[in-house]
Amino acid sequence: MRRYGKHTDEDDIRQRPNPKGNRARTNIRPKHEDASEGFVLTVDRGRLTCLVEDRKVTAMKARELGRKAAVVGDRVSLVGDLSGKKDTLARIVRIEERKSVLRRTADDDDPYERVVVANADQLAIVTALADPEPRPRMIDRCLVAAYDAGLEPLLVLTKSDLTSPDKILEVYSTFGLNYVVTNREELETGDAAERVRERLEGRITAFVGHSGVGKTTLVNSLVAEGRQRATGHVNKVTGRGRHTTTSALALPLPSGDGWVIDTPGVRSFGLHHVDPSRVVLAFPDLVPGTEECPRACSHDEPDCALDQWVEDGHADPARLYSLRRLLGTRERREGD
């Protein structure tokens, strides 16, 4: 049965009310062309602290971003209350394209990637020469993660007053790494901070390392007064440090030209996500030799063309050993 006559008009049509409001539903998302640019300083339980011009603004991720999450170092676009006043909240509506992503997994068989920081230029791998003892496998894993992310690694050795750095520097001499050696007295006088800071100017540098190696103490010496973080101590029984840094935090250098990102101390650095072909790029003297390698070559198998490349004198055998040592870290635990 027809409800309306032949000549109905719009007023005759009954409209079902929208229980969620009067606005029509749409899949068209706003472009937010008036959004302001920000830099993510830290993330804490869904709330992000962003630097917008010279103000710290608390924000949350917009629902329209879906599962995409912003991390420390991200460049983002924000709308809403950008005053930075207490109890105000802005909204992150866009995460800009990242130029680099430092990632890790909980273990080598864990497929879930965790983004540590975004847009860093350099990875400072901090390790103590003693108390706690250095763990070369952890350094190797951090180097692999740095090369995979396209970051320049910087090896920072602390507590040289307890033992000589010569042995560990000899291990990494073939990598061509930049490095800085510090001791406790230099940290107190500020000399260590000055030498490390020279390597950081004009860059965004993420600091990683085991708990107790002096990473946060070093970061505190690099930044301005009033920005220092709490530090811990090494357990005399276990030889391990206590986690005092629980979230990543970006801090500006006093000069205003460069950032340091202090990350929580880690006890493992899984490499499930790593593409071996990206690690090879950190060895430019070996890259041409990979052109004759079979497809999907692991660079550590009988058919690998790098053996012949080295035998023909194009590269130092120690360099190939170093590459294969790094690529083999996925099969070895840090404590091995």
Image: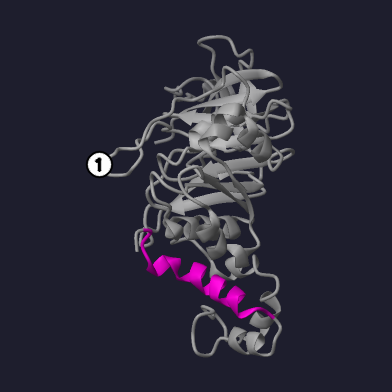
In the picture of the structure, the residue carrying the numbered disc 1 is: 237
Most common SS among magenta residues: helix
323 in the magenta segment: yes
Please name the amino acid that badge 1 sits on: Val
Rendered-image quadrant of the C terminus = bottom left
Q: Nearer the viewer, residue 140 or 111?
A: 140
User: Which residue is rendered at x = 66% and y = 45% of the image?
Assistant: 97
Q: Position of residue 195 (x, y in %)?
A: 67, 39
Q: Which residues are magenta?
A: 315-334
User: Which residue is rendered at x = 67% and y = 48% of the image?
Assistant: 99
162 relative to 336 in the view: left or right: right
Residue furthest out toward the left: 237
64 in the magenta segment: no
291 relative to 26 in the view: left or right: right
Q: Position of residue 146 (x, y in %)?
A: 57, 55
User: Which residue is rendered at x = 60% and y = 26% of the image?
Assistant: 50
Q: Dot 1 surroundings within 10 Å: few (below 14), some, or many (20 or more)?
A: few
User: Which residue is rendered at x = 64% and y = 65% of the image?
Assistant: 282
Q: Position of residue 293 (x, y in %)?
A: 60, 85
Please say whether residue 248 is visible from this viewpoint: no
Q: Is residue 288 above or below residue 169?
A: below
